[in-house]
Image (cartoon, rainbow, N blue to C red):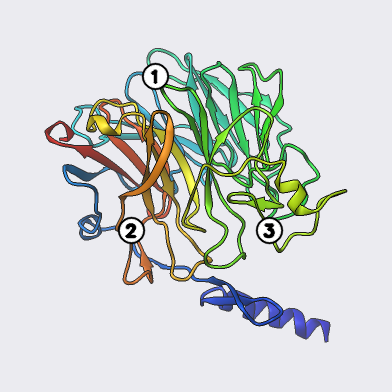
């Protein structure tokens, strides 16, 4: 009987993953739906479907990549992008400044699952689930062999993609997602952001209760740290929201017991020695919430000179797209309006990847980078394309 059951599971379960699935609670009420839009290959025709605000245009900065994720800009204008599935870092160079990368080459290889990337004071920092590397960058663009700074970051689990960035204080911040969808973590560095000195010392947990804050950054004027957090799955089509949080040292943002504005997660047991409601009162509620399950990935504040002045100091977030929401949502880049250093509203900025009434998609935005000319680069790890959003006559 056990052998028959195993054969049934091996054959049937993969087939079920190809079709929408519905999850209900014990009363039979709808809780969530597995609904994955069909992937369509990129084509020039697809490019015409993309929509941006008036005055903006979209072109292909680079294509023919495999799974481009996070990006970093070097002082000379070279864009470096990680590909964790290929274990490499690729350099993209726009030699004639026409908004298209004429040269692409792998500059670092054999870095298993490399994902996070940032450049600081002539050094490139890279991060995989458990390893942080540092590599010296020469003035001629040569990157020396990376050396390991840390080798004991928490193991991947549910969220293995690490991101990192230097703050205004000169410290390096690393986002470490949760090991699960919703559980009590054993390692306090899971579901957190840690902070270290550039040499890997003085390690501390900066903020916690963050299920997976892959995208984060600092407001150019206030220097406040902000991040977009991914909410838990299987809480329904319309809960919990994706959270924009102001991240402060020592802050607890509630996960896994609370979400949104301090709502207790009905699917979680109580924490030790208190109720969920009591626990939630001790946490920091979100600043603003966005459509559930849209999966925010990269986040970047706009500090370029190409876009209209009202975009200055606003932020962009790449919404990778849902897989357990009906109808599907995300597959877009959103703008986060800030006024006097505070977020006031979300707005769709780059959309059109999701089409055919949500049944199809040809792009999943992942990484973001403000290029040297002030345009916004958007990586798609779905079809291996990097898009460039520019404004006005300066854009081409």
| Quarter of the image with the N terminus in it | bottom right
* Mark count: 3
Number of other residues with Cα within 10 Å of mark 1, as a class: few under 14, some 14 to 19, many 20 or more: few
Q: CA distance from mark 1 to mark 3?
A: 49 Å
Number of other residues with Cα within 10 Å of mark 2, as a class: few under 14, some 14 to 19, many 20 or more: many
Query: Which labelled disc corresponds to residue 141?
Result: 1
At 62% from the left and 75% from the top, the residue drawn is 23
At 56% from the left and 73% from the top, the residue drawn is 17
Say which element carries label 1. loop
Q: Earlier in the sequence, mark 2 or mark 1?
A: 1
The residue singled out by tag 2 in the image is 353
Corner quadrant of residue 68: top left
* Residue most extreme to the right: 273
Say which element carries label 3. loop
At 51% from the left and 45% from the top, the residue drawn is 86
394 in relation to 17, above or below: above
Say which element carries label 2. loop
Measured from the top left, where is residue 4 in percent x and y?
76, 85
The residue singled out by tag 3 in the image is 265
Residue 150 as seen in the image, left or right of residue 309: right
Residue 75 as seen in the image, left or right of residue 278: left
Q: Closer to the camera: disc 1 or disc 3? A: 3
Q: Earlier in the sequence, mark 2 or mark 3?
A: 3
């Amino acid at each position: 009987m056990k052998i028959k059951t195993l054969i049934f599971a091996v054959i049937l379960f993969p087939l079920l993953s190809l079709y929408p699935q519905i999850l209900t609670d014990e009363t039979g009420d709808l809780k969530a739906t597995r609904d994955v839009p069909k992937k369509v290959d990129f084509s020039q025709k697809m490019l015409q479907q993309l929509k941006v605000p008036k005055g903006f245009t979209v072109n292909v900065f680079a294509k023919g990549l495999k799974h481009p994720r996070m990006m970093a800009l070097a002082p000379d204008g070279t864009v470096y992008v990680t590909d964790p599935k290929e274990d490499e870092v690729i350099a993209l160079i726009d030699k004639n400044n026409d908004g298209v990368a004429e040269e692409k080459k792998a500059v670092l290889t054999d870095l298993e699952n490399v994902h996070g990337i940032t450049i600081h004071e002539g050094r490139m920092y890279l991060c995989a689930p458990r390893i942080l590397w540092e590599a010296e960058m020469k003035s001629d663009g040569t990157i020396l062999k990376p050396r390991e700074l840390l080798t004991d970051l928490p193991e991947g689990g549910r969220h293995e993609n690490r991101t990192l960035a230097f703050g205004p204080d000169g410290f390096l911040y690393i986002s470490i997602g949760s090991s699960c969808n919703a559980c009590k973590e054993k390692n306090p560095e899971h579901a957190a952001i840690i902070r270290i000195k550039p040499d890997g010392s003085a390690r501390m947990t900066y903020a916690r209760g963050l299920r997976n804050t892959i995208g984060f950054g600092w407001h150019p004027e206030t220097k406040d740290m902000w991040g977009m957090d991914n909410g838990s799955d299987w809480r329904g089509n319309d809960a919990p929201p994706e959270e924009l949080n102001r991240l402060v040292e020592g802050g607890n943002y509630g996960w896994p017991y609370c979400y949104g504005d301090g709502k207790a997660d009905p699917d979680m047991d109580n924490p030790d020695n208190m109720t969920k409601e009591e626990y939630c009162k001790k946490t920091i509620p979100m600043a603003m919430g966005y459509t559930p399950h849209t999966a925010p990935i990269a986040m970047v504040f706009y500090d370029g000179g190409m876009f209209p002045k009202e975009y200055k100091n606003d932020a962009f977030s790449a919404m990778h797209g849902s897989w357990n929401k009906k109808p599907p949502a995300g597959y877009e880049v959103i703008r986060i309006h800030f006024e006097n250093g505070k977020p006031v509203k979300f707005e769709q900025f780059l959309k059109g990847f999701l089409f055919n009434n949500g049944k199809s998609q040809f792009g999943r935005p992942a990484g973001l980078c403000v290029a040297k000319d002030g345009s916004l680069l958007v990586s798609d790890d779905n079809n291996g394309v990097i898009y460039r959003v520019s404004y006005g006559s300066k854009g081409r």
